[in-house]
Amino acid sequence: MAITDIRAFSHLTEADIVALANEFDSIRRDVENSRGPRDARYIHSVIRLQRVLEVVGRTVLFGSRRRSRWLVGTAALSLAKIIENMELGHNVMHGQWDWMNDPEIHSTSWEWDQTGPSGHWKRAHNYAHHTYTNIVGMDEDVGFGILRMTRDEKWRPRNLAQPIANIVLALTFEWGIALHDLSAEKDSEGVPPAQWNSGPNKEFAAKAGRQLVKDLVFFPALTGPAWRSTLSANLTANVVRNIWAYLVIFCGHFPDGAEKFTVEHYENETRGEWYLRQLLGSANISGGRVMDFLTGNLSYQIEHHLFPDLPSNRYPEIAARVRALCGKYDLPYTTGSLARQYFLALRTIHKLALPDRFLKASSDDAPETSSERKFEAYRAAANGVVTEASTGRRRGLLTAMRVHAEQAVAERRRRRRESKRTGLPAAV
């Protein structure tokens, strides 16, 4: 099952966790105290770039019956929508730029170019997801209520269809998020599902209606005879934006190493353990400055979950300090290329579509789901020693994971040798 005792899983003492929290608090203070003109210049330049790209895309699409112009216009519009969604909408609504006191760039006033109302998203995402990150049964973003992403969730026959549901979710991601947030909004307000004239439903219908009119009617109509071509360009740009946002979110939350947690853990969680849960429950994407920008710096998902309301352009410098702390406390820092992280997430989607009887690993020791119980043999062998006498190096979670992996490989080799000797199938 998921992690119930994060202290045991992380191989840290209570004093270690308090010290780690103090170091994370220090990072926050340093960034908050150094916010200033260069950060303001950054966000204003991003807004200008996004608006220029959208104007260029819309303008070029006036002649979109020519294939070359359609391609250029659609590419510019797709890029504008990605930037607006990732670096602007997501981060502005997290309050990352509220310190500027600019009414245009403020979490209370920004409405993004997406189907769901920003108010619904902020309550479902900023509060629920970032408070209960990866707590099974509390964080509804674990699979978005559609996909089974951990063995802690009971298998249901509908999960057999999740490879197909995953494709549909990727193509229509803005609608999936909007409906997910609408459901959370109605739950928080105690609105019965059958009450169609509820406030949340009216807010959703108004926002979705505006988006549909804008993309399917207004802008195509402006291009006159080229309206069909412009309509296809708008739909294509939305799908491109949806797939990109889906990829970034899944690569940051569902590859191997992004751990899950139990409600029992949360009930007595300290501030330091909250930091630790964010660190162990997230994963980064490596790829350079262009990748960072196009993901809204959510390629630094670990740093985003540690400090969701700090300016996204500061995540690279924060990451250097977070990695140093991981080295100091012998903790893993989960990162990988976009292709690798998505392959791992996709493997989980397809694997957990099957009933548990077809899965080999246990729920305490699987690539996508593990707990502190996987290290029982290691802790017994270590006999409470947290520092190697020969090197003075800390024996923490990273070392435990390495030793555990080596032991697993050795055990598989032993079973294969035994199978060859006896002629019987190797036990699994």
Image: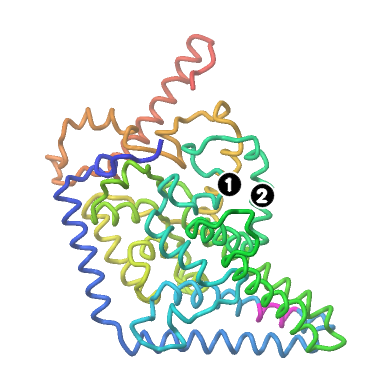
* Secondary structure predominantly adopted by residues drawn in magenta: helix
- Residue on which disc 1 sits: 147
Query: Which sits earlier in the primary sequence, circle 2 or circle 1?
Result: 1
Q: Residues within 10 Å of mark 1 (few under 14, many from 20)?
A: many
- Residue 72: within the magenta? yes
Residue 37 at x, y percent in the picture: 33, 90
Left/right of residue 184 with respect to residue 136 in the rendered view:
right
Looking at the picture, which amino acid does disc 2 mark? Ala
Q: Residues within 10 Å of mark 2 (few under 14, many from 20)?
A: some
Left/right of residue 256 with respect to residue 181 in the rendered view:
left
Looking at the picture, which amino acid does disc 1 mark? Leu
Residue 308: which quarter of the image? bottom left
Left/right of residue 215 with respect to residue 92 in the rendered view:
right
Residue 149 at x, y percent in the picture: 52, 44
- Residue 129: within the magenta? no
Residue 135 against residue 233 in the figure, above or below:
above
Question: At 36% from the left edge and 71% from the top edge, which residue is drawn?
Answer: 309
Residue 311 at x, y percent in the picture: 37, 76
Image quadrant holding the N terminus, namely: top left
Q: Are marks 2 and 1 in contact (CB under 8 Å)?
A: yes
Question: At 24% from the left edge and 69% from the top edge, which residue is drawn?
Answer: 27
Residue range corresponding to the magenta coloring: 71-77
Question: At 62% from the left edge and 58% from the top edge, which residue is drawn?
Answer: 195
Q: Nearer the viewer, residue 427 or 204?
A: 204
- Residue on which disc 2 sits: 165
Which mark is drawn over residue 341?
none
Left/right of residue 399 with respect to residue 90 in the rendered view:
left
Q: Nearer the viewer, residue 342 or 80?
A: 80
Residue 259 at x, y percent in the picture: 40, 46
